[in-house]
Amino acid sequence: GAFGVVPRAGAAAPSATGASLPRAAVPGEAAGEAGEEEGLEGASTLSFATWNIAGGHRSAVAPPSWSDRDQRAAVLGEVLRWRQARGVDVVALQECEGEEAYKELEAEFQLVGVAHAHESRGYVHLYVRRGLRAEGKALSGEDPCVLCRVEVPGGGGAGGAGWVNVAAVHLPAGAAWERRHAILQKITRTCAEDCDRLLSVGDMNSTDSQVQ
């Protein structure tokens, strides 16, 4: 798994973080504002998961009788298990088959945005658990990214709410690093004006050092 901490308000300028983990689920947590200088004890957390689900593709190790319906049920059932077992708040999915929300997830999650990954495959979906406030943010329709602000209850210190920018991406594979870097830079510039905390998740198609 991958775990991260969202910097406290007033910290350095936002940066994108993530790893190249195609077709893998990455659960993790991002801590909200702790309200204490010495650490994150008592901080609220935002739990997240990202998965390139390779929608429409059947697993190479599946039995011959395994259908597309079986594949979809297994994938979305796993996402729901994360919600029940790990309390996941935010889910980013890559290589979804279409723009429509997965009905199987609607009881637990709301779809806050969709982006077409023109240079990769399929669509990026960003889901937030029901009951959690989220606001979409505008980004170029040509970029494979869904961007929104998510409220972290207690994340503003002293029991108040705070906000975290969440960017769900599927960066193009095989393209020059400059193209991927330009997308990440656009995300950080868009987020810099109203919030200094940014969590970038998804299929980066990059090394850790490149993204950092």
Image (cartoon, helix red, strand yellow):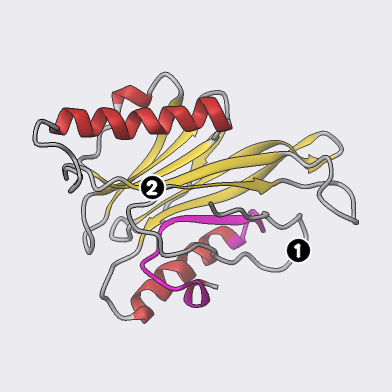
Quadrant of res 67? top left
Q: Is residue 129 visible?
A: no
Does the stretch in magenta take in 196? yes
Mark pair 2, 1: CA separation: 29 Å
Residue named by callout 1 = 11
Q: Which residues are magenta?
A: 192-210
Q: Is residue 203 above or below residue 146?
A: below
Identify the residue shown where x is 18% and y is 40%.
62
Identify the residue shown where x is 83% and y is 34%.
159
Q: Amino acid at mark 1?
A: Ala
Residue named by callout 2 = 51
Depth check: give the residue in front, 111 or 19: 19
The spot of residue 184 in percent (x, y) is 46, 68
Does the stretch in magenta take in 58? no
The nearer-to-camera label among 2 and 1 is 2
Q: Do the CB atoms of the residues marked 2 and 1 lie less than 8 Å apart?
A: no
Depth check: give the residue in front, 81 or 45: 81
User: Who comes first in sequence, dot 2 or dot 1?
Assistant: 1
Determine the residue located farthest toward the left in the rendered image. Answer: 64
The spot of residue 12 in percent (x, y) is 72, 68
Identify the residue shown where x is 33% and y is 60%.
143
